[in-house]
Amino acid sequence: MQAITTALTATMGGLLLALAIILPVAGVLLSFVLGGRAAERIALYLMPAGLGVAAMIALGVWRSGAPLVYLLGGWPPPLGIALRADGFSAVMLLTTALVILCAGLFARANFPTPAGVNEARAPFAFWILLQGLWAALNMVFLGGDLFNLYVALELLTFAAVPLVCLDGRAETLLAALRYLVFALFGSVLYLLGAALLYGAYGTLDIGLLSSRISASPAVWAAAALMTTGLLAKTALFPLHLWLPPAHANAPAAASAILSALVVKASFFITVRLWFDVLPSLPVETPAAILATLGSLAILFGSVLALRQERLKLLIAYSTVAQIGYLFLMFPLAAGLHPWTADAWSGGVLQTLSHAFAKAAMFLAAGLVAETLGHDRISGLRGLGKVMPMSVFVLGLGGLSLMGLPPSGGFTAKWLLLMASVRSGQWPWAIVMLAGGLLAGGYVYRVLAPAFASADLSLKAPAPRNRERIALALALCAILLGFAPSGFFAFLQIGRPALTAIP
């Protein structure tokens, strides 16, 4: 009886994996069929359902203590396609569903269909693209095949790029074009690398490749091509040039999703590539290179954030810096050592806490720009008096970015810092401490004038209901700092190990 129950639970969990992708895809199709105002209603009805599906997947992974796997059509790889959810996938699905739900609720005021009009271009496009982006993200987090991950990345790109330039302004079109060029450059490199692996091994299934791959010139070339392509999409320094203008000029809801989720998709695939596909390669040098680029991103991104005059640009350059922390997990979480589990948990927690903090900060910055008519930092004097909740959101998000307790950012950076110290890899610890100080500097640049005494002229009243949405996301970033030990055990479910590092 217990075996039957276990099998039934696994089957139901597997079907949920397919449903996580089907729901937003069905929303896109229905929106095209029904058109007009239906697109907004369909998206807002499906988002809570998608959050419920993500929660059930996480519950299934937790109960089983092992990854959930679903074979589409019942065909095993390499003939079929496998969907897979482990601890990392499950928390990313939950984060994605929650951030997109909050962004959708926030965007209702910016993208409504005008009264007396059956269909308007910008609102219809926004709700279609939002659902398409959601579907692509879920495909990335559940994909078990390198080619299907490529398809998901392309869908993600062609949903994300138009979100940048929905208003049609010249600067947003230029930012979107630059984003597209970098994204396509990354796609070409990734696809070339995948083609090399397929030519060498006859499959792109992650599980099959993991057991077959050995160090060879073709494999090293594929790894280099795919990694470079993914870094371009992740905007890791020095391939970050597209990110600040794209994130700073997009609508607030789009900026929140781009920073919180879209750049994390290519990072997620980078983790899958090196930890799942290439565990047999001697990866000490590649891991050190990735961590070095991450360290440069932390330092240069933070310094550039300090020099910005606009609030959204400051937050965008902060994203460049915070992405750098993610790549410190490659040398720290590699191998089978006492500190690798903590480093893995720290990297995943940094991914989550940054997602919530940055989504909250971009939403708050968008409200500031709408209320004041600008987002110039020099013009924020007295903001705390007229928009205290938005300033509080910026402060909570900044707390997590600096890595101060009791935020999720603190716990993430503490775990990475301790792994660095225990492993004797001191340079990464020094960079993390310096990055925290620099983050404190650019957060202070925003909060200091906001709490100054001055009178502000408002272009529009402060929207309290939308401020509460941003506050909810910021509180999520803080609450992650109180995560129990069971949460970190959950993150270890399905965790691979780069065993080649001695």
Image (cartoon, grey):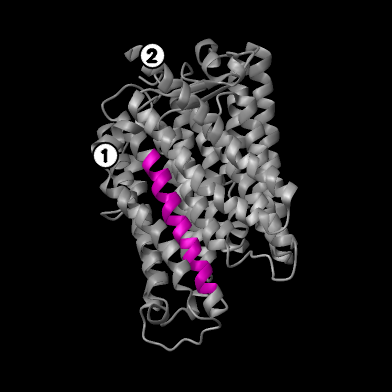
Give the number of callouts: 2
Q: Main secondary structure of the magenta part?
A: helix
Question: What residue is shown at x 33% (from left), y 32% (from top)?
Answer: 490
Q: Secondary structure at mark 2?
A: helix
Residue that carries the numbered disc 1 in the rendered image: 418
Residue 368 lies in the magenta-colored region: yes
Q: Which residue is farthest front?
A: 1
From the viewer's perspective, is residue 91 above or below residue 475? above
The percent coordinates of residue 414 (x first, y second) are 28, 45
From the viewer's perspective, is residue 118 above or below residue 259? below
Residue 331 lies in the magenta-colored region: no
Question: What residue is shown at x 33% (from left), y 27% (from top)?
Answer: 63
Q: Where the N terminus falls, by quadrant?
A: top left
Q: Quadrant of residue 136?
A: top right
Q: Label 1 is placed on what type of residue? A: Met
Q: Label 2 is placed on what type of residue? A: Ile
- The crowd level at tag 2 (other Cα within 10 Å; few <14, some 14-19, many 20+) is few
Q: Quadrant of residue 255?
A: bottom right
| Magenta region | 348-369
Residue that carries the numbered disc 2 in the rendered image: 4
